[in-house]
């Protein structure tokens, strides 16, 4: 295990075959009258280089799983390992530093900084880590998401699909051990959403990245290598090769 103070900016974190593992992870929110058990003993391993979709009925704990697995929120108990690092017990500062270097995020709302250009938004992960942006990688990423000619635009001058392409490129910038995406196509029309999903898949494959994506959309989940099903805070199934209607049906059954 890597000691918190020894987190390196350059250490390759996906040398083993598992990019992320959760072992008996529980997450309980204090709540009002009663605590909410949003994760009840989740054990899950995500293979390096894979694309995993997380599906389940509303309130089943998908966003909680993503936030806890990504180190955005701490577990109540259990162990989370990203690459070779046990992040469950890192101090807040060490965890922030670790996330900047080794975890990528894509959100439904893009989360671009409005006063920075496309290129500057893309450079943020390096800047936040006190490093110079890698100009060659920046050009490669802009080309990979089809935005080479929009590097100097502001987010307000982009369509939703273009903004999400910037977010994808930014998530890939530091070659993270894993990229977590929460409903990345949720704010887009179905045509643009499909194009974004293609761009994401292609970029993730081209750059050998690992992607874990929460989605309600069975068409999106059908493009994943594997789908993890959650119900009531627990992993109840994992499946590969199901069609969109089959995935839809499975989620409906879990919600009953
Ligand atoms: N900060 C919080 N405080 C208290 N309870 C919370 C908090 N965040 C989530 N919950 C509860 O935890 C449970 C799981 O929520 P979560 O958002 O992870 O589900 P989800 O599957 O992502 O839902 P949806 O599909 O509707 O987005 C729900 O019962 C929710 O009300």
Image (cartoon, rainbow, N blue to C red):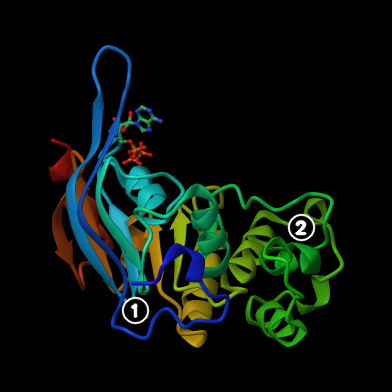
Q: Residue at x 46, y 75 (%)?
A: 201
Vertical placement of residue 1 versus 153, above or below: below
Mark 2, residue position: 158
Is residue 246 something that shows in the picture?
no
Q: Residue at x 72, y 56 (%)?
A: 159
Is residue 19 something that shows in the picture?
yes
For the view shown, which residue lies furthest in the top direction?
A: 33
- Local crowd size for mark 1, using a 10 Å CA cut-off: few (<14), some (14–19), many (≥20): many
Residue 166 horizontal/vertical position (percent) = 67, 65
Callout 1 secondary element: loop
Mark 1, residue position: 48
Left or right placement of residue 184 versus residue 17 in this view = right
In which quarter of the view is residue 39 placed? top left
Callout 2 secondary element: loop
Residue 250 horizontal/vertical position (percent) = 16, 52
Between tags 2 and 1, which lies in front?
A: 1
Residue 244 horizontal/vertical position (percent) = 28, 61
Task: Decide which of tag 2 and tag 1 comes sooner along the chain.
Answer: 1
């Amino acid at each position: 295990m890597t000691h918190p103070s020894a987190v390196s900016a350059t250490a390759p974190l996906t040398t083993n075959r598992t990019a992320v593992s959760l072992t008996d992870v529980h997450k309980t929110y204090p709540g009002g009258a009663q605590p909410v058990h949003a994760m009840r003993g989740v054990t899950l391993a995500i293979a390096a280089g894979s694309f995993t979709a997380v599906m389940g009925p509303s309130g089943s704990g998908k966003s909680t799983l993503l936030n806890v697995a990504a180190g955005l929120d701490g577990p109540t108990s259990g162990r989370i390992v990203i690459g070779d690092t046990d992040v469950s017990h890192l101090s807040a500062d060490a965890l922030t530093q670790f996330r900047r270097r080794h975890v990528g995020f894509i959100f439904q709302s893009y989360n671009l900084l409005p006063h920075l250009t496309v290129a500057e938004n893309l450079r943020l992960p390096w800047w936040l880590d006190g490093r110079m942006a890698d100009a060659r990688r920046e050009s490669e990423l802009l080309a990979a998401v089809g935005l080479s000619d929009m590097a100097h635009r502001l987010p307000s001058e982009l369509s939703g699909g273009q903004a999400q392409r910037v977010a994808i490129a930014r998530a890939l910038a530091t070659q993270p051990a894993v990229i977590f995406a929460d409903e990345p196509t949720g704010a887009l029309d179905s045509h643009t959403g499909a194009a974004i999903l293609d761009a994401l898949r292609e970029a993730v494959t081209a750059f050998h990245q690992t992607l874990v994506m929460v989605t309600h959309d069975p068409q999106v989940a059908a493009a994943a290598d594997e789908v993890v099903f959650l119900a009531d805070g627990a992993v109840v199934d994992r499946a590969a090769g199901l069609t969109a209607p089959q995935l839809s049906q499975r989620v409906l059954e879990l919600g009953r």
